[in-house]
Image (tube, rainbow, N blue to C red):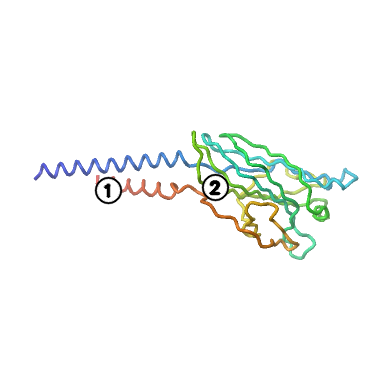
Amino acid sequence: MDREEELGRKCCTCCLKFIFTAGLGALILWLSLRAGKPKCSIQNFYIPALSKNLSSRDNTTLNFMVRCDNPNRDKGIYYNDVHLIFSTINTTKTNSSALVLVANYTVPKFYQGHKKKAKKWGQVKPLNNQTVLRAVLPNGSAFFRLDLKTQVRFKIVFWKTKWYRRVEVGADVEVNGDGVKANEKEIMMKKSDFWKTQGYWSDFGADDVDLTGDGAQNKGSKMKKSDSSLPLRSSFPICVLMNLLVFFAIR
């Protein structure tokens, strides 16, 4: 009887060791598959028409440069089309929080290697030149907003993930009397609810975005939501924690 109990205990110990090893392996796999979203920033922002040094205000082009950094050491990033929305505060209305669409721009899809920085220059003409000129405050400065929206996939070793992660970030930009951004340093773009709160749920189509003077959008198609995180993130840590608790409790 004692021999059978000892054999049963050894068998139970082996099973627990296997569970613990499997949980530890799952944790390592989860850590290796975990990928960070790209970090985006505004490097340059220039509107010649707002420059006091230029006599002509006919040139209302908006020049910019956005940089996307891949923080992952061993994972590449596949970007879908990157959609940019430029807007400004509606100073002609009593509601100062209302936004007016200035312009939109699309950066074609591209791939970015690990720990690489992608600089995307662009030039766009506002939908309405007067919108840009009306954004100027009495002190000569003007405030604009740039919002970015895209979806990314990751390249891990030799395979590409099938799941997407959604990137929705934005930042405010102050432009001085010379028409350039007042802050000489880069402006980091942070997570933004702009696309949700303003109702911009078009199918990643910048042409479908239609802001009125009150900052509202006409009805459009809604974007299909995708899984924005790894399924492993929610299951692996819990399984590993449970395995550890069982192992040390019975031991």
Q: CA distance from mark 1 to mark 2?
A: 38 Å
| The furthest residue to the right | 55
Label 1 sits on residue? 249
Can you say whether 160 is above or below 175 in the image? above
From the top left corner, tell me how far across and down residue 20 is, in percent.
31, 42
Which residue corresponds to mark 2?
165
Please indicate whether residue 209 sits to the left or right of residue 49 in the image.
left
Of pointers 1 and 2, the one earlier in the residue sequence: 2
Q: Circle 2 — which element? A: strand
Q: Nearer the viewer, mark 1 or mark 2?
A: 2
Asked which secondary structure carries label 1, the reply is: helix
Residue kind at label 1, given as amino acid type: Ala
**In terms of image quadrants, where is residue 44?**
top right
Which residue sits furthest left? Answer: 1
The amino acid type found where label 2 is placed reads Arg
**What x and y, as percent, mark residue 88?**
74, 55
Q: Residues within 10 Å of mark 1 (few under 14, many from 20)?
A: few
Q: Could you tell me how many numbered marks the image carries?
A: 2
